[in-house]
Image: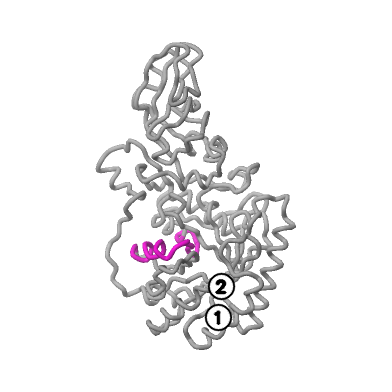
Amino acid sequence: MSTDSLPEYRQSFRDRPRPGHTPTGSSSTTAALKRTGPAERAAVVDLAAIRHNVAALRSWVQPAALMAVVKADGYGHGAVPVARAALDAGATWLGLAHVSEALVLREAGISAPMLAWLHTRDTPFGRAVEENIDLGASGWELEPIAAAAQRLERPARVHLKIDTGLGRNGCTLEDWPQVVERAAALQEAGLIRVVGIFSHLAVADEEEREAETDDQLRLFHGAVETAREAGLRPDVRHIANTPGILDRPDTHLDLVRAGLGIYGLTPFPDRPASEFGLRPAMSVTTTVAQNKAVGPGHGVSYGYRYRTTAATRLALIPLGYGDGVPRPALEAPVSIGGQRYAVAGRIAMDQFVVDLGTEDPAVAPVGAAVELFGPKSGITADEWASAAGTINYELVTRIGSRVPRIHVDTQPGVDAGTQSLPGR
């Protein structure tokens, strides 16, 4: 979709009154922080970093447009504030997994084009059509989408998905000709409009497997040609995720879907986010809840996976797997008062322990600032993910609802502008 068509797309939302909306659950506001004082624990999200990352990625993919993927509550960062920051920085689309997620953004007054692509028989297709939410379709969804459009007497906006090898949702290559023929017939009947054709890359984050990405791209182009032969003329073709954006410019096409990159995370295990000019947006913070002296050989946490080797002090950190801190992350790094330490013993549901390696009671006293990861400490989500045997975007997404999201803006009023990534 060209930017010229965006005002027309938003027309139905311009004069519609919308109630104020404050996200509930994991997303909280700086206003709440001011009312209650410093949070006992928090995931602090810098919206300036979101804007910076979106602007940087836009520079990387131009002239393709950029869809900011804000599913799963914005990868745990807060979908509504992140969506607004991304749009401010030049994203022109928003991406969600579920229609219910898209409806939250509409209720917040966000009128930008958005696509939801993962459906069940219970998906509220009618609400999506009413709210101008584009719908991904792999085949079976076309009929209930068309039925909703007929009932509402307005065409549904559809993106057809082809499975080029990932094996999740998406139409198989074998069924694709029949699906595009059916889509063309529904479009001719005025029930749908095929806005896009898309797929998803499987191994673009593994640079040594570029031949498999080549195969996916070849199959995708073939599927688009088949759709065109059936009479479809999609506005946008999209297949690139963040690794495709950063490492495969041949996948950019008309539109890219930027997920973890807008949060300042890298998809490559051996290439840090800073290499691409990206800034992490989330910091997970708390304070020391207890500091006590123990002797040598003292057991720490369940199973005694850790015992002190000398007289020392133990600091108790009030975050655990009930807050989304991964239980297997033995020896993960922690910053206390600006000094780096490591998790000692198993992480429990609500807390974990750090061996301070000193008998000095002035080190890491109760109330001392703790950062698990974030720009201030320099500890990355990647380090925690490595300690837990997982990936950085699982780590930030899993931070639980007991940890308030505090949205800050370290550069209020600053225009993100056009930024260039290293090497461009």
On screen, residue 140 above or below 399: below
The magenta segment is 87-108
On screen, residue 190 above or below 44: below
Whether tag 1 and tag 2 are in contact, CB under 8 A, the answer is yes
| Front residue (pair 146, 155) | 146
Report which residue position mark 2 lands on.
160
Q: How is the image coloured?
A: one colour
Could you say which quadrant of the image residue 243 lies in? bottom right
On screen, residue 191 above or below 222: below
Q: Secondary structure at mark 1?
A: helix
Q: Earlier in the sequence, mark 1 or mark 2?
A: 2
Report which residue position mark 1 lands on.
183
Q: How many marks?
A: 2
On the rendered structure, is 376 left or right of 275? left
On the rendered structure, is 330 left or right of 14? right
Residue at coordinates 46% horizontally, 80% vertically from top-left?
A: 146
On screen, residue 316 above or below 76: above
Q: Amino acid at mark 2?
A: Leu
